[in-house]
Image: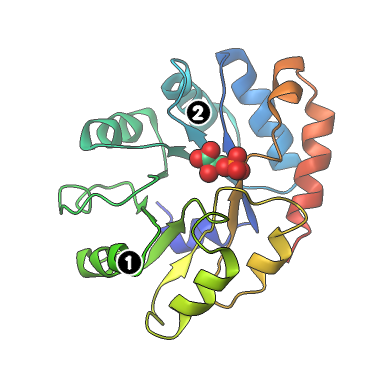
Amino acid sequence: MKSLSEILALAPVVPVLIIEDLAQAVPLARALVAGGLYALEVTLRTPAALACIERIAGEVEGCEVGAGTVLNRHMLDAVEKAGARFAVSPGLIESHSFTDSEVPLLPGIATATELMAGLALGYDHFKLFPANIVGGTGALKAFASPFAQAKFCPTGGVTLANAPDYLAQPNVVCVGGSWVAPSDAVKDGDWRRIEDLAREASRLA
Ligand code: 3PG
């Protein structure tokens, strides 16, 4: 199993996916991989999400499928069973019951206090969330000096237009965003459009 830092280094953007229909999971993942995005976050926001993770893990070569919106230990165990290679949560649970999982977790933080709690638990990679609301690149610059060991995947309000500013920060390893898989394109099965969006995102540096 790859480490979280290896997974987050696979591409500049981690697509945040909301998949309603299990039949969309494999073609969607293949379009994103064809476009050059290799770490995919399937959020646990639909009844199909766990089955989508299982399907992508089993059928799509060349990507690491992760689970997003993991809010508790029960969900973490479920995504591990489904074959997720990483997990993402919007916030930090201040408990070691999350850190002993086989599946590496990217916890969300929004403040220095949460960051300190996460570092104390042993995490070194964090999702800055919701990035645009909690200070954006200004917050990342402010965290860089006191928290030199912390690396970030800012997510929430990140777009093709502002992603380069985030990616230019030395403490940013990648960004997360839903813009590469718009809901109308997923619904319509417009995999060509999604592949093009992924390719554009994969060329960000
Ligand atoms: C989310 O949890 O939905 C992610 O933060 C994605 O945010 P975005 O839709 O602003 O990219």
Residue 56: percent from the left, percent from the top?
Answer: 54, 29
Instruction: Name which residue lies at 56% across and 16% down.
Output: 20
Left or right of 142, for residue 76: left
**Which amino acid type is marked by label 2?**
Gly
The reply to whether discs 2 and 1 touch (Cβ–Cβ < 8 Å) is: no
> Dividing the picture into quarters, in which one does residue 132 lie?
bottom right
> Dividing the picture into quarters, in which one does residue 138 lie?
bottom right
Question: Disc 2 vs disc 1: which is toward the camera?
Answer: 1
Marker disc for residue 47: none
Q: Reply above or below: 112 against 35.
A: below
Instruction: Name which residue lies at 48% across and 32% down.
Output: 43
Q: Secondary structure at mark 2?
A: helix
Residue 47: percent from the left, percent from the top?
Answer: 43, 15
Query: Is residue 64 in view from this perspective?
Result: no
Q: Reply above or below: 45 against 67.
A: above
Quadrant containing the C terminus is bottom right
Q: Sequence-wise, which precedes: disc 2 or disc 1? A: 2
Left or right of 177, for residue 160: right
Crowdedness of circle 2 by 10 Å Cα count: few (<14), some, many (20+)? few
Kindly identify which residue carries mark 2.
Answer: 58
Q: Secondary structure at mark 1?
A: helix
Label 2 vs label 1: CA separation? 34 Å
| Count of marks overlaid on the render | 2
Kindly identify which residue carries mark 1.
Answer: 115
Instruction: Name which residue lies at 44% across and 38% down.
Output: 68
**Which amino acid type is marked by label 1?**
Leu
Residue 9: percent from the left, percent from the top?
Answer: 56, 62
Residue reaching furthest to the left = 96
